[in-house]
């Protein structure tokens, strides 16, 4: 099976590292990292990714703006997106899902939950 590429969009290097560490337990996965939505879009202009995990609260471009831009781009539209955020309110979740996010994970993250969501969205068992 070809490598699945997961893009982690998170302004906190520590949190990016934590998420990447969880995902490295999946075999055949490579990690791409971006510090905000703008950097993420730049990376996706030159690299193919199979899954996006993004925070909401980031400088320059937040995760919700990123979700709407990805969903509005014919080339990127079908990439599954999971939000990983401290925003636990129901309306935040509903807004993210309405914009096109496929899943919503509230911090503090649990490695098992991140893995389960990644497996489901990548279609790997």
Image: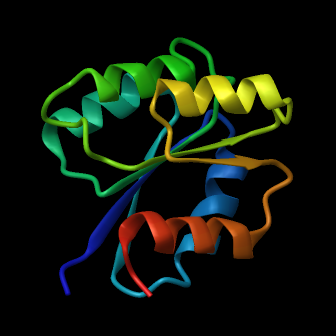
Q: Nearer the viewer, residue 79 or 13?
A: 79
Give coordinates of residue 41: x percent, y percent: 31, 28
Q: Nearer the viewer, residue 46 or 88?
A: 88
Quadrant of res 117 = bottom right
Give coordinates of residue 116: x percent, y percent: 61, 73
| Residue beneath the point at 85% across and 36% down | 88
Viewed as shown, does residue 15 lie left or right of 125? right
Quadrant of res 93 = top right
- Quarter of the picture containing the N terminus is bottom left
- Quarter of the picture containing the C terminus is bottom left
Viewed as shown, does residue 78 lie left or right of 113? left
Q: Identify the coloring.
A: rainbow
Q: Nearer the viewer, residue 59 or 72?
A: 72
| Residue beneath the point at 48% across and 74% down | 119
Give coordinates of residue 44: x percent, y percent: 24, 38
| Residue beneath the point at 50% across and 38% down | 101
């Amino acid at each position: 099976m070809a490598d699945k590429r997961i893009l982690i969009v998170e302004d906190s290097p520590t949190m990016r590292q934590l998420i990447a560490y969880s995902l490295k337990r999946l075999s055949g996965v490579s990690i791409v990292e971006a510090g905000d939505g703008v950097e993420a879009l730049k990376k996706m202009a030159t690299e193919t990714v199979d899954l996006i995990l993004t925070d909401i609260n980031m400088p320059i471009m937040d995760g919700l703006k990123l979700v709407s831009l990805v969903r509005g781009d014919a080339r990127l539209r079908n990439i599954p997106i999971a939000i990983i955020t401290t925003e636990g309110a129901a309306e935040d979740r509903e807004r993210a899902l309405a914009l096109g996010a496929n899943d919503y994970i509230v911090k503090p993250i649990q490695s098992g939950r991140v893995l389960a969501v990644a497996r489901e969205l990548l279609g790997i068992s």
